[in-house]
Amino acid sequence: MTRKIIIDTDPGQDDAIAILLALASPNDIDVLGITAVAGNVPLPLTQRNVRVVCELAGRPDMTVCAGCDAPMQRPLVTAEHVHGTTGLDGPEMIAPTMPLSDQHAVDFIIETAREQDGITLCPLGPLTNIATALERAPEIADKIDEIILMGGAYFEVGNITPAAEFNIYVDPEAADIVFRSGIKLTVLPLDTTHKVLATAERTAAIRAIGGPVAETVAAWTEFFERFDTEKYGSAGAPLHDPCVIAYLLKPDLFSGRQCNVQVEVSSPLTLGMTVADWWHITDHPRNAFFCGDVDANGFFDLLTERLARL
Ligand code: RIB
Ligand code: CA
């Protein structure tokens, strides 16, 4: 069954690879549109980067909407230290010529949810657009089949503070709205994404596909791996956001647990922390399927096979 999805994103090299994976899988995924949010870099860059990736994938027809340029209640925190000043540093990228929709991303999400039964939202950045849509049109919660997001952490804890993962930390109030929404929720946290490392061997296998897409993906991973290799001693770049699309394509590559997950929205020390009741110590509602593990080789086999189709 082809899944109808909206990708909400803040490219970011890993977001870009996730978008390519989705666009390389038209028999499995119908991308209804891609909405940009401020996150890794400010909104003018994330909306530009979405269009750069769509053109790289040969999809200048894709609906691309710009969304919220700041979190719901806080100033924006960005991650140029990871992704570079453009958000897609590494290879030289040509400026996009495809149009940006004049519809705001939040309106696009609301309108699409109302018109199409059973869409899946795939947020790859801060949850500002998603939460704003749910606040503005609460009835769409019943029209959304599932939210599959990259964010949070359990054992791996934080990458932007000692306690919090970036996507949740940037807009914790938005994350709290999403996690309390009652919509079927699947979470790909750092505990999973830190296990899909683009090692030199895996990057070489992608580069060996040949062509501009493969070369660009290899150059992106070689650029953004430096943050994680320096910080964690990782053997390569963790492909955080592509895990969301890989989960859509092959959920059996992942394992996890249905449990209660809540977001810290007040403590200055642990703001943005996702608190997963992994051992069901409380009787709080088990609102999220929280992934903990992944078949990394299976993930890279899938990614490499699909990228070769573009
Ligand atoms: O913490 C990793 C997440 O933050 C990824 O989505 C990455 O693109 C950044 O947005
Ligand atoms: Ca992202």
Image (cartoon, grey):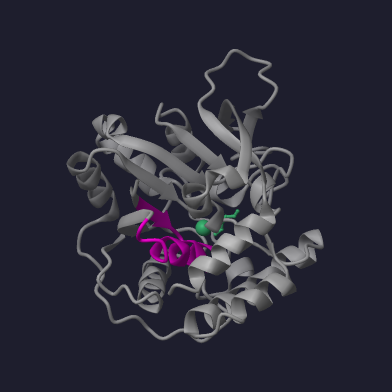
Considering depth in this image, is 143 or 309 the residue closer to the camera? 309
Looking at the image, the residue that sits furthest to the top is: 283
- Ligand 1's quadrant is bottom right
Indicate whether residue 267 is drawn in magenta.
Answer: no
Residue plotted at (39% across, 76% down): 52
Up/down of 227 relative to 290, above or below? below
Please, which residue is most extreme toward the right here? 233
Report the number of numbered marks.
Answer: 0
Look at the image and say whether residue 18 sits in the magenta stretch.
yes
Residue at 71 percent across and 53 percent down: it is: 195
Which quarter shows the C terminus? Answer: bottom left
Q: Is residue 251 visible?
A: yes
Q: With 303 as the anchor, is 193 left or right in this view?
A: right
Of 96 and 246, the residue lying toward us = 246
Q: Position of residue 138 (x, y in %)?
A: 28, 31
Q: Position of residue 30 (x, y in %)?
A: 32, 55
Q: Position of residue 71 (x, y in %)?
A: 43, 49
Task: Say which quarter of the image contains residue 208.
Answer: bottom right
Q: Nearer the viewer, residue 271 or 154?
A: 154
Q: Nearer the viewer, residue 67 or 266?
A: 67
- Look at 49% across and 58% down and name the residue there: 39
Which residue ends up furthest to the left in the rendered image? 115
What residue is shown at x 28% (from left), y 75% (from top)?
A: 60
Q: Quadrant of residue 136?
A: top left
Q: Is residue 89 above or below residue 174?
A: below
Q: Which residues are magenta?
A: 6-27
Q: Position of residue 40 (x, y in %)?
A: 52, 62
Residue 125 makes an appearance in the image: no
